[in-house]
Amino acid sequence: MISGNDGTIYALVIATLGEEGGKRALDALAIDDALMHERGRNVSRSAFAMAMNVVLFHDLLERVPSGAAYVRDTLAQGRRVTFDHGALRTICFGQGPTGDLPAGETAFKRIFLPLGYEMAAIYPLDRLKMTGRAYRHIDAPETIPQFFLSELHVDRFDAEFAEAAQRVFGTSHDPLDSGARILLDDYAAGRPVDLERAAQVLPVIAAAFDRQHEPAAFEDYALLRSRSNEAAWIATEGNAFNHATDRVPDVAALADRLKSEGRPMKEKLEISASGRVRQTAFRADGVERPFADGISRIVPGSFYEFISRDVDPATGMLDLAFDTGNATGIFAMTSAV
């Protein structure tokens, strides 16, 4: 029996990650009190969305040692992380699904929309042959992390690239089972979702943020990488969080400090056209991944990002926008180990 006595989000995260991992993830994040205090038999879409983000943040730190080290240092200084957004990459062939997986953003829009997200903006990433989309939570846009979902357009590349992409990504399976689909349908329709069922389904939905296709042939990986570092990254990492982002008061000052400590920092700060959104990041950590020939190789993995957002004077609210130039610059963090 799952108990919500300590709060709905606490119960969901502990049920998914176990007591040790769950408490570690929750202790690392500054989560809005109103969300953490939710209790009761049923789980709101906001609480489920926040619990999902906590699980995904934990997964990223398990794969990104540089990010985990930064979070440990942050906690040692008596601060917690304000989780601004997570980013993921998808594949779109142009026509049809990706194996058994719905094409591109569709694979995640079916998760985001029922959980209370809406698409806030589209960001053309033409130099990368990609499109970025921001998904922002309707109920608590400043406190529930956003998603920056990017879609790589295979049909903008040459035929040789498209054939390799089909061989790699065409083996994808759909991780969502009937229970997950029913739960999402219930949220979409406004029907109640009880805590026991939410706890059973959360790990299934979290598993969607992973690699869904078989290990690639190294020759196909090399061909994809010769045309697109981003396609090669998806070939080994799939739809896992590409990065998670800490919202900090002064990202420029933080970057200077982290550089002085010898951290693997991006050299240049990315500043939006408005000047209100400033970003930087660690370079991607290397990870060992298997290929179809049975040999594991070191490839670029995910990374940890930092962002500062100013208030938009036109609205009096925090500027939650992204920026095409910033995103393109940040994507370069996974171009090499």
Image (tube, rainbow, N blue to C red):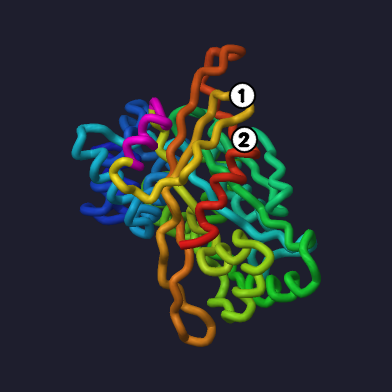
**Which quarter of the image is occupied by the C terminus?**
bottom left
> Residue placed at 26% from the left, 56% from the top?
18
- Labelled disc at residue 138: none
> In the rendered image, which residue does mark 2 sit on?
323
Say which element carries label 1. loop
Is residue 125 or residue 27 the one in the foreground?
Answer: 125
Say if 184 sits above or below 94 in the image. Answer: above
Tell me if residue 325 is in the magenta stretch: no
How many numbered callouts? 2
**Residue 198 appears in the figure:** no
Is residue 74 or residue 6 the one in the foreground?
Answer: 74
Q: Please rate how many residues cluster around mark 2, counting C-alpha atoms within 10 Å: few if below 14, some from 14 to 19, many from 20.
A: many
Say which element carries label 2. loop
* Amino acid at dot 1: Ser
Residue 14 in the image: state x and y as whole percent. Answer: 28, 50
Q: Please rate how many residues cluster around mark 1, counting C-alpha atoms within 10 Å: few if below 14, some from 14 to 19, many from 20.
A: few
> Residue placed at 43% from the left, 38% from the top?
306
> Residue placed at 54% from the left, 42% from the top?
147
> In the rendered image, which residue does mark 1 sit on?
274
Say if 249 sits above or below 281 in the image. Answer: above
- Magenta segment: 249-259
Residue 83 in the image: state x and y as whole percent. Answer: 41, 38
Q: CA distance from mark 2 to mark 1?
A: 9 Å
* Amino acid at dot 2: Asp
Q: Are marks 2 and 1 in contact (CB under 8 Å)?
A: yes
Residue 132 in the image: state x and y as whole percent. Answer: 65, 45
**Residue 114 appears in the figure:** yes
